[in-house]
């Protein structure tokens, strides 16, 4: 057995890790629902063709793909958008627009594992489908910010770096750049912060631009730019604008973004982006060969980087730790002082679990009373109830205060409330 | 796009289907937690070796397996037990026994899809690790029954068919059957109800037995058999024994079961088993090459057959449908009677979502008031709040009764409670 390990880049979720994962998912779910998003899920396995259609042949390098036994080329989902586009194309007629949909689930990329990046990660995606307005952009960015707030992150911890591809479209048209040159420029801007100036300068020269020119243009892109006016007023009304910083370097490498684009970053630890997305008004038409043409805006957030930041921000970590303790602990430990009353204890346990819906633990094996109390502590029980020869008189102990009282069986529900 | 379909046997979860899936998962989770089980999860992808180790070379036919880019043979998990055994072996030292663990997640089998069986299904597993007692068997069977009860199934709907492999072990020893003959007998018993008597008779003849002899022995296996005494008293104390029927034909084909075995069936629709499991006291030792020797008992339940039964039992369906409506609907629809008050409305929406944690929807686009009310109905809103020129006076309407009243903004929280 020592020889059989997890597959490289894949994670075992032991109960503590699983409770953290569940906490992250519960935050995603509860905030998305408050925003009126409903949950869906695409299959974990799709025809490889689907991913090539969106991202071209290169995506295959990053896929876990294989031929199934019938010779079909299939791949484990590396992202959700293509599957969503497939689902929308199939059934969008049945839904009023806009559709506000979210999904959570594992995605898989064949990349070198490193901090903030594993081969399997859990991705949250939220999309507003069928609304091309700035109000929809605001609703989506608002959701991203309120997710951060619900985790316990403040404006001191995270920032939404936001821009709009329309600004670049107009700039590139003004310069008369062709499609290939536009793609070069977007790549240069996307990597501006990560590569040396000489490298950017050299690539810009190819398309007849200089770094000075580019940077001059970028300084014009501020919160005062009219393209941001509606978004700003909308998020100001919600009290969320303080999380946003206009940043012209955010273009999101992918070709399919058409308007608002944003990424969420932490401000202190230089982690990878926590989330990213934007408006993609033409992708559904591309994916459906023109059958469905719905303007959309969406973003994704992975569990790995969020998890790293949760561990580092004290207030957010406290919130998570409380949720984890709650998930792992029980409400009541029923201790047996008299083995002869085991069946009476089982009846009580069933009542507590079934009628009061409490998390109840007990020792299935006969055990000394002090050992049972040790287990109660280990299991983080809030209450201990001792069943002994005085049954139906019970000893009820609140473990945080060590307060103890004698209660009749018939009063137990009342006592625990 | 019309050409790109889901992979055969894989499911799209549109919001309605996803809400049903989530309902099933929420029942699994809440009951398992009340029983003191904590959640874990094994990876979706494991080294193929792991599954061969438990089930032999034949399992490979049923696996979605492939070589990854580094030449490793990997497989999508067909079941959870081998991954659990791997996790236990790695870290069981860190946990007090017994460990009561549950997991939910997709499993994958390359089989012909048919009613109640798809290539991807969601499996719930619960295991008690490190307790070899009948009390642990009872706790686990109790959980299986209470899961059924929580779904809304009664003794009229489902039955736990239960037996104990020890009875067969003793019988086979008495007959002096060797290992191969024992395996033949267990296969015959396992398939007794599904194959023609002549087929069973022929196979029994190979090992020197007759069908009459076998059936005679099986009639001796009743609830009065001493092997069931502890389990019966235990489940009677909980009021759950009425769900159990002793049934000697339940042996669970798999070789590794050593004691209590059971399967849960519906009583009216002849569906596949809803759940099945039992005691496997030697499997952890096998999987860990003898490093870890922990007696265990566990069972699995898939989402597909449970889903079929939920659709057919009226009371259970009503419970599910309510949960689904609740998941898909919103609490409050904020309607805008005066477009000039949009930012005031957004502020109110933020307050309702953030302070009151309500699910709030509204129209991002300007829309006639009657159209907004149509959307409120479509989104199953409980309340509508109309923001108009009288702001901060608001019109609050309870949509179930059409009751309407005028409320000041400052009283809104009070009004909705």
Image (cartoon, coloured by chain):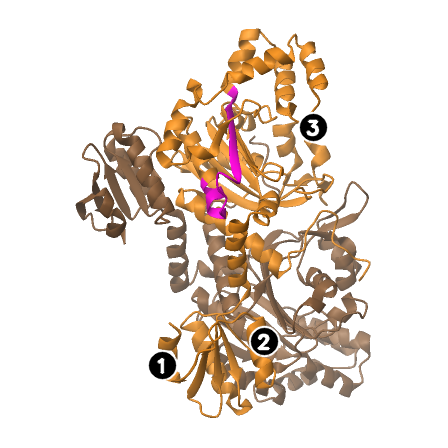
Chain colours: A brown, B orange
Front residue of B393 and A289: B393
Q: CA distance from mark 3 to mark 1?
A: 69 Å
Regarding mark 2 in the picture, which secondary structure is present there? helix
Residue B131, quarter of picture = top left
* Residue B60 among magenta residues: no
Q: CA distance from mark 2 to mark 1?
A: 25 Å
Q: Earlier in the sequence, mark 3 or mark 2?
A: 3
Regarding mark 1 in the picture, which secondary structure is present there? helix
The crowding category of the residue bearing disc 1, from other C-alpha atoms within 10 Å (few below 14, some 14 to 19, many at least 20), is: few
Tell me the subunit letter for badge 1: B
At 73% from the left and 71% from the top, the residue drawn is: A256
Label 1 sits on residue: B411
Viewer-nearest of labels 2 and 1? 2
Question: Is B239 located above or below residue A193 in the figure?
Answer: above
Q: Earlier in the sequence, mark 2 or mark 1?
A: 2
Viewer-nearest of labels 3 and 1? 1
Is residue A64 among the parts visible in the rendering? yes
- Residues shaded magenta: B146-165
At 61% from the left and 19% from the top, the residue drawn is: B186
At 54% from the left and 54% from the top, the residue drawn is: B22
* Residue B164 among magenta residues: yes
Regarding mark 3 in the picture, which secondary structure is present there? helix
Label 2 sits on residue: B375
At 39% from the left and 84% from the top, the residue drawn is: B407
Viewer-nearest of labels 3 and 2? 2
Residue B367: x and y in percent read: 60, 84
């Amino acid at each position: 057995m020592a020889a059989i390990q997890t597959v490289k880049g894949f994670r075992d979720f032991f109960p503590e890790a699983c409770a953290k994962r569940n906490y992250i998912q519960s935050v995603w779910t509860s905030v998305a629902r408050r925003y009126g998003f409903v949950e869906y899920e695409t299959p974990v396995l799709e025809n490889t063709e689907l991913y090539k259609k969106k991202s071209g042949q290169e995506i295959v390098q990053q896929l876990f793909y294989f031929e199934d036994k019938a010779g079909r080329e299939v791949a484990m989902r590396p992202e959700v958008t293509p599957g969503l586009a497939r689902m929308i194309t199939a059934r969008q007629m049945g839904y009023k627009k806009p559709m506000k949909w979210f999904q959570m689930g594992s995605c898989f990329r064949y990349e070198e594992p490193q901090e903030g990046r594993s081969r399997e990660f859990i991705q949250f995606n939220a999309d507003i489908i069928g609304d091309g307005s700035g109000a929809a952009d605001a609703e989506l960015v608002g959701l991203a910010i309120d997710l951060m707030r619900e985790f316990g992150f403040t404006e001191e911890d995270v920032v939404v770096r936001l821009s709009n591809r329309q600004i670049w479209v107009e700039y590139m048209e003004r310069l008369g750049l062709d499609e290939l040159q536009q793609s070069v420029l977007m790549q240069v801007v996307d990597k501006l912060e990560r590569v040396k100036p000489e490298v950017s300068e050299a690539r810009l020269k190819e398309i007849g631009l200089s770094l000075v020119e580019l940077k001059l243009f970028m300084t014009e892109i501020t919160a005062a730019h009219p393209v941001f006016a509606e978004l700003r007023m909308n998020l100001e009304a919600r009290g969320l604008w303080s999380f946003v910083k206009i940043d012209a370097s955010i273009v999101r490498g992918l070709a399919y973004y058409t308007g608002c684009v944003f990424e969420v970053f932490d401000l202190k630890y230089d982690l990878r982006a926590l989330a990213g997305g934007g408006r993609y008004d033409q992708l559904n038409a591309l994916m459906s060969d023109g059958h469905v043409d719905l303007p959309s805006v969406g973003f994704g957030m992975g569990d790995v980087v969020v998890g790293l930041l949760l561990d580092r921000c004290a207030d957010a970590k406290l919130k998570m730790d409380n949720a984890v303790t709650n998930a792992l602990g029980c409400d009541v430990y029923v201790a047996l002082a008299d083995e002869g009353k085991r069946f009476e204890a089982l009846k009580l346990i069933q009542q507590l679990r079934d009628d009061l819906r409490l998390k109840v633990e007990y020792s299935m094996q006969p055990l000394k009373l002090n050992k049972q109390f040790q287990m109660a502590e280990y299991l983080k029980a809030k209450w201990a109830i001792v069943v002994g020869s005085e049954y139906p008189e019970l000893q009820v102990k609140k473990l945080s205060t060590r307060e103890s009282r004698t209660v009749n069986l018939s009063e137990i529900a009342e006592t625990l409330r």
